[in-house]
Image: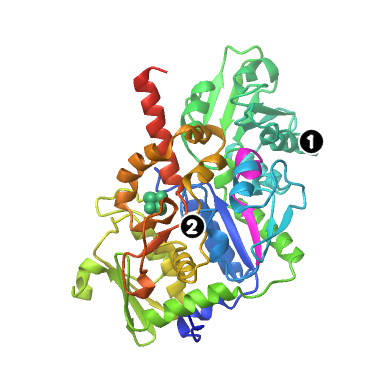
Amino acid sequence: MRTRPTSSAACSTVAVMRSLVLVGHGSHLNGDSASAVYRYAELLRQRGLFGEVIESYWKEEPSLRQVLRTTSSTDVTVIPMFISEGYFTETVIPRELGLGHQGPVPPGGIARVIGGHTVRYTLPYGVHPAMQQVILERAREALPEFSAQDTALIVLGHGTTRNENSNRVIHQNAAALRELGLFAEVHALFLDEEPKVTDWASRIQAPRIIVVPFFASEGWHTQETIPEDLNLSGQQTTFTATPHAPQTIYYAGPVGTHPAVAQVIFQIAEEASQQSSGGDLDHTLVEAWNTLGERASQGLRVGEVLIVPHGNLYELRHVLDEGRAANELTTYVTPEGLRDRIRFDDSGTYRPVRTFRNMPRHWRAVVGAHDLRRVLQYVYPAAVEETHAYTCRTLHFTPWPTTARRQTGLYARVQKVSSAQVEQVAATVCSQCLRSRLWAAEPLTRTFLEGVPGGLPCAEACTYLVAAVRDWQKQRKQEAGT
Ligand code: SF4
């Protein structure tokens, strides 16, 4: 019988009573996609409102399916880091977290007990009333001396016909800003639905027009499609052939990247923390990290990473760099420093799955026991918790048909792919990965906690594999001309 390990210094960081999870979209392709969530998580850690702040993503790790296993407290607040309500905040995130809720989230959020955790799910930051101030800040940056006599404001949303709630925030902000009386006109316009921003000239009479994109970040739309649709030649463009010419458009930056957004997120976190009376330590997690601490104190290899204790410190490095002098390697002393290094392989290519066998080399991280957990959470997200659960026989596997049935939207088509065809795709994708596919009945006799460095469980097909299956199917259909 397994005995409960005694506590060790490496687990001292788990003594918290409230956990905050920030959920971002993440990406399989773009290594910078997660950076805004990382930045806000760091700011919130400095505020100290919650005992811990954890990042989770739809398309990166720890995934939404894994993240509740990684929180120290049984009291968990989840803030979706999205600019508006819609498919992700109302369908994908609640589904993947197992909230048992689909559709619009009420203003007070949703509270559920899931696997012994009390989980509070809030509205996305973009719909918080304080975002009006962020829009105003952006407008001021674009045209500091705007006036109620001659300046119109366009709050520009993406718009979609797939979810009526996604545009509600644009209309609400435009209405609230109109009431303030700071502008001659305030319009809610969209890229992909009526009223369209391309019709601005027929709607707006004011000679000066500020366009504030209500978008989460700079990207294809803010940098390419919007300037093209509006015929902009820069931050300021004057039109002489419009019905109310001359008219000048002042193009602002997207609201989501304004520094004031951090304040909005603090406010949401504060409001959420007031609703919470705190929880207990998750003892399963304590046990998992105590086990890891014990093994690490004797020297341990996890996947491609070697952990060597040095007094009160731990040194981590790529196993192939064992024996190299410290001055031949780049040294990191914070979890964030190492995190940013290992997101890319040695050729600079983004690593969408952290357990792929392409960990970059030539680095070492030297951290105290209190940072060992965070470092490993960035190196192999959720691996310690899942591996410990596997050794305790409490890790539930999800077979492919169940994963496929859960998919919606563009991914729903993977439901038509047979398990044999999935195996074909997995043969390419998963062969790069350290994890053993328990969901496909692959054997895993011993884990890294039991001395086999590559022994890491995979309980469910990851979103990277799901996307690869979808792409494979799409290509097959194109080839068949159907
Ligand atoms: Fe790795 Fe494949 Fe599991 Fe994804 S599905 S984590 S690639 S083993």
The image shows residue 22 at horizontal and vertical percentages of 58, 56
The image shows residue 343 at horizontal and vertical percentages of 36, 55
Pointer 1 residue: 181
Pointer 2 residue: 62
Amino acid beneath label 2: Pro
Q: In the image, is 320 to the left or to the right of 12?
A: left
Where residue 443 sits, quadrant-wise, is bottom left
The image shows residue 191 at horizontal and vertical percentages of 59, 26
Task: Residue at the far right: name it.
Answer: 179
Relative to 382, does residue 245 appear above or below in the rendering? above
Q: Residues within 10 Å of mark 1 (few under 14, many from 20)?
A: few
- Near-viewer residue (97 or 360): 97
Amino acid beneath label 1: Gly
Residue at image point 59% right, 59% down: 21
- Near-viewer residue (233 or 167): 167
- Near-viewer residue (57 or 252): 57
Magenta residues, start to end:
75-90
* Residues at circles 2 and 1 in contact by the CB criterion of under 8 Å: no
The image shows residue 429 at horizontal and vertical percentages of 33, 45
Q: In the image, is 156 to the left or to the right of 418?
A: right
**Which quadrant would the C terminus be assigned to in this image?**
top left
Q: Residues within 10 Å of mark 2 (few under 14, many from 20)?
A: many
Relative to 48, does residue 255 appear above or below in the rendering? above
Residue at image point 54% right, 76% down: 286
Relative to 37, does residue 235 appear above or below in the rendering? above
